[in-house]
Image: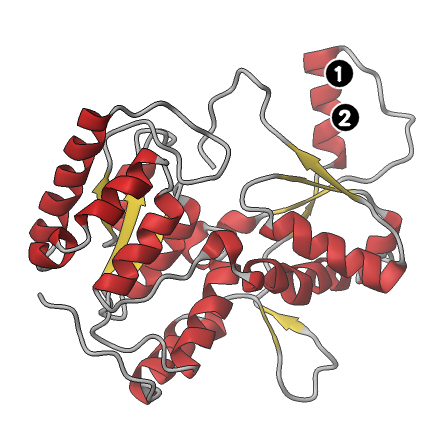
Amino acid sequence: MKAPEHSSRVDLALLRNFEESIGTKVPHVEKRGSGGRVLNATPLVDLTDLLKECAKAVYGLDLPEKEFKVFGKLESKILSGSVKVRPMVQIVEDAIRGGRLRSGQPVFEATSGNFGISLGLLADLGLDVIVLVSRKLQEGVFEELQGKSVKAVNLDVDICPAPGMKVDLDALTVKAVSANIRNQLSQFGLDPNVVDGSRREVEELLARQDVINLAKLLARIYRGFCPEQYDNEMNVRAHETVTAPEIDQQLSTMGYSLEEFEVVCTFGTGGTSGGLSRYVEKKYGKRSVRIVFPLSEQDVAG
């Protein structure tokens, strides 16, 4: 398969299919007469009693008299089962509307799993989704990506797509990984001569372990599309404009407000924490988002 011609014209058929099959089925703000109501919200579950039981059983802490509430967002119930579908929908819809993504264009991205899983929804629309992954994946993620009809380029080295996790790659390893990428792209039906013409750039990026920009390079030379999740502003905006008000609206039905709570989330690309933090600071004038990082000895991709 050769690189398709790029056009700035909007693919209306793809846009309509995307909106009907994906856009309307994920959490989104109702456009007409709702006052900003979020539709298709994922469950907000009261975890207070479970937390108290866990504290006593695991840590020997007796908390029954403590007055507090703990809620958890059950994102496994979202379309595709990945929280990353939230920014993916906004990024991809914007690309389709802007004519940067059309039927026939391959989609490339570097992923530690979740974003790639969400991109699997695009494969259901007939788009070729190709993700760059490494051995630093949690068990079962590679198989799940393949189960979503995503074409995963297995780098077969311990490179993590996320910034800040580096290992040393010697020149021979770089060339071997480059050849491995070429072979896998060829197996996916892409013209290997295209990547041959950029072999030097590919190897330079691999030497720097810059898988993020490698995905961008492949999208450029194959005239495809890269969501650029790691530095795309919509990765943050999706959570500021949908996730945060969604939680706030759910809390309001229980007589609470997000202003009353501390928000705890794990850190990946920073989209969820950044978006929630912006919303809370703008609406309530406070900083209440707490980010949890893995322990220094833990090796967690992304």
Q: Give the answer, above or below, for where 89 lies relative to 84.
A: below
Whole-percent x and y of residue 206? Answer: 30, 38
Q: Is residue 60 left or right of residue 82?
A: right
Of 17 and 279, nearer the camera is 279
Residue at image position (24%, 71%) is: 105
Near mark 2 (Cα within 10 A), the count class, few <14, some 14-19 or many ≥20, is some
Q: Are marks 1 and 2 in contact (CB under 8 Å)?
A: yes
Of 43 and 236, nearer the camera is 236
* Quarter of the image where one finds residue 55: top right
Q: Amino acid at mark 2?
A: Lys
Which quadrant does the N terminus fall into? Answer: bottom left
Which mark is drawn over residue 121? none
Whole-percent x and y of residue 131? Answer: 29, 50
Q: On the image, numbered disc 2 is attached to which residue?
A: 52
Q: Amino acid at mark 1?
A: Lys
Q: On the image, numbered disc 1 is attached to which residue?
A: 56
